[in-house]
Image (spheres, rainbow, N blue to C red):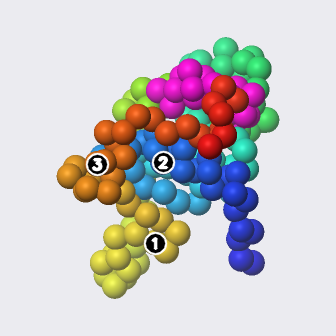
């Protein structure tokens, strides 16, 4: 069954997460858990589902973070400690947004990566990514991205405290 097209709001949020990860050198995007996820250094770090941001945080902080207004655990059965959906009310300001991005990136080096699956044939092993996956390399001197990185931060309508452009 083909995937449903993503709404403009979801695409805008995916772009906002992508922009937040511009400084990371090993970022892959793919579909998991019904979300558009961002793998940093081979580990799930952030994702987008609808208007919510998926974050992976230190599992030991699960109970405390779960009490935060606008935050809900990925699993209601307690099977995925440290994974949370953040609703728009909990990332409505740039300060809130940056808190969640920073928290996910801070935990990422400590997170365990899932074991890589061994591919069955050498023909498929030669392909670096699957059709739904995109590898983003460090942007270095890429003129198109370099000029936007030097410019002041763009306003995104995902923030309540910004005027919509």
Main secondary structure along the magenta-highlighted residues:
helix
Quadrant of the rendered structure where residue 99 is? top right
The 10 Å Cα crowd at callout 3, few under 14, some 14 to 19, many 20 or more, is: few
Judge by depth and name the residue closer to the eye, 47 or 158. Answer: 158
| Inter-mark Cα distance, 3 to 1 | 27 Å
Q: Earlier in the sequence, mark 1 or mark 2?
A: 2
Q: Earlier in the sequence, mark 3 or mark 1?
A: 1
User: Helix, strand, or loop for circle 2?
Assistant: helix
Which residue was labeled with disc 1?
A: 130
Closest to the camera, between mark 1 and mark 2, is 2
For residue 12: magenta?
Answer: no
The C terminus - image quarter = top right
User: Helix, strand, or loop for circle 1?
Assistant: loop
Which residue was labeled with disc 2?
A: 18
Residue drawn at x 67%, y 14% is 64
Residue drawn at x 74%, y 17% is 67
Residue 1 in the image: state x and y as whole percent.
74, 78
Question: Is 65 on the left-hand or right-hand side of 121?
Answer: right
Residue 21 in the image: state x and y as whole percent.
42, 42
Residue drawn at x 36%, y 39% is 151
Is residue 160 in sight in this rendering? yes
Which residue was labeled with disc 3?
A: 146
Judge by depth and name the residue closer to the eye, 117 or 153. Answer: 153
Judge by depth and name the residue closer to the eye, 56 or 124. Answer: 56
What span is colored magenta in the figure?
Answer: 85-102
The 10 Å Cα crowd at callout 2, few under 14, some 14 to 19, many 20 or more, is: some
Q: Earlier in the sequence, mark 2 or mark 3?
A: 2
């Amino acid at each position: 069954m083909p995937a449903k097209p993503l709404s403009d709001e979801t695409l805008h949020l995916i772009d906002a997460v992508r922009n937040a990860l511009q400084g990371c050198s090993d970022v892959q995007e793919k579909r998991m858990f019904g979300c558009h996820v961002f793998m940093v250094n081979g580990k799930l770090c952030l994702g987008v589902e609808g208007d919510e941001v998926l974050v992976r945080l230190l599992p030991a902080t699960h109970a405390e973070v779960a009490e935060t207004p606008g935050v809900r655990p990925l699993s209601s059965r307690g099977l995925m400690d440290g994974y949370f959906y953040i609703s728009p009310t909990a990332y409505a300001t740039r300060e809130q947004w940056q808190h969640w991005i920073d928290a996910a990136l801070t935990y990422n080096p400590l997170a365990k990566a899932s074991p890589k699956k061994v591919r069955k044939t050498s023909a498929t092993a030669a392909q670096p990514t699957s059709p739904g996956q995109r590898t983003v390399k460090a942007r270095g001197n890429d003129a198109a991205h370099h000029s936007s990185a030097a410019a002041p931060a763009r306003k995104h309508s995902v923030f309540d405290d910004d005027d919509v452009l």
